Amino acid sequence: MNDRAGAPQQPSHHKPGGGYRNPPGSPAYRAGLRDFLRFLLWDMRRAKLPPIPDGHVASTRPDLAALADNQIAWLGHACFAMRIGGKLVLTDPYLSRNAGPFGLGPKRFLPATVKAGELPRLDLIVISHNHYDHLDTAALTAYRWRAETPVVCPLGVGPLLRRQGFAEVVELDWWERHHFGPISVTALPAVHFSGRGLFDRNRTLWASMAIASSERRVWFGGDTGYGAVFREIGERAGPFDLALVGIGAYEPRIIMEASHATPEEAVTIARDIGARAAVGMHWGSIMLTPEDPFEAPIRFRRAALEQQYGEANAWIMQVGEVRSF
């Protein structure tokens, strides 16, 4: 069943006539056509992939079915498997080569740790929004237990998931909670946007997600820029044992500031929501933007020191690594 966590009767993020917008206090979109053309035709064409650092990938593949309670495995980008409240949960399964339709879009430089067809039976899939690097329909259709596994997603994303063969799809608005046996998922605000084509921008909702059992609380950021709303999340929904927060794809700022946090802002988000520890994600598998893809973790850990969050609390995991939380 669903319940509400104090949401207003007419939420401000619902646009008159349909569609959604970011919460008050979010950065405004400042980029113009010239900025986007420079980004696509100049910045991304000049971007070069540096050598992949030693130790970036774990030496062994994770056995997801064998995860113990309160363990988490990073499968790359924003895809995590975790066991919480005895349930095996997967977030934003982007496991294909391309982040785009029909084999188009940016290509991974690091293959997926686990192929979609090799995933064990999951107890829940959590989707934060409908962008291709977070909602990978090829991976979802290759998953073998679509009829048995529930999916939770933001408003408007459900029809796409049902077309992939998922029988139980729960759509949530911000501040709305749904219980799946011993765990609950609450959709919370994020600073981002949605769309999979030229004509559907912001027609479906985007969200961060709180995944909670009686023992642990995990905040999954999906995709987000920084905004004042995270202090509200901390006050109304925090604290959290662990935050999964994006630290990559942040340049150029005039384009990305309204949708992707810098590594420094990611630490501030973790502090604002009251997370005891934070995992830096959304880096290290695919180049979506022109900055060095391995710069983010260095800046993330340095920011944790500078903001007195604690370097040990800013986790940089190997792709495929398993940790307890």
Image (tube, rainbow, N blue to C red):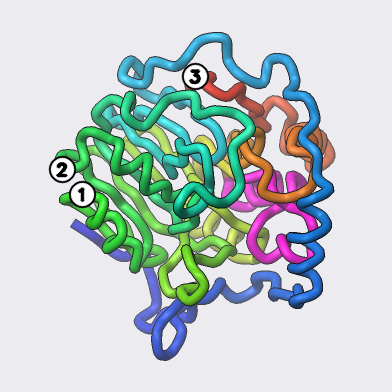
In this orientation, does residue 325 appear?
Answer: no
What residue is disc 1 on? Answer: 165
Which residue is identified by label 3?
A: 322
Q: Position of residue 249 (x, y in %)?
A: 69, 49
Q: Is residue 170 above or below residue 76?
A: below
- How many angstroms separate mark 3 from mark 1 (CA)? 30 Å
**Kind of residue indicated by mark 1:** Gly
In the rendered structure, are the residues bearing label 1 and label 2 in contact, judged by CB atoms less than 8 Å apart? yes
Residue 43 as seen in the image, left or right of residue 161 = right
Which quarter of the figure has residue 125? top left
Percent position of residue 276, x then y? 58, 36
* Label 1: element kind: loop
Q: Image check: 59 left or right of 13?
A: right
**The label number, if any, that marks residue 271 in the structure image:** none
Q: Which residue is mark 2?
A: 147
Residue located 31% across and 19% down the image: 65
Residue at figure coordinates x 83%, y 48% from the top left: 46
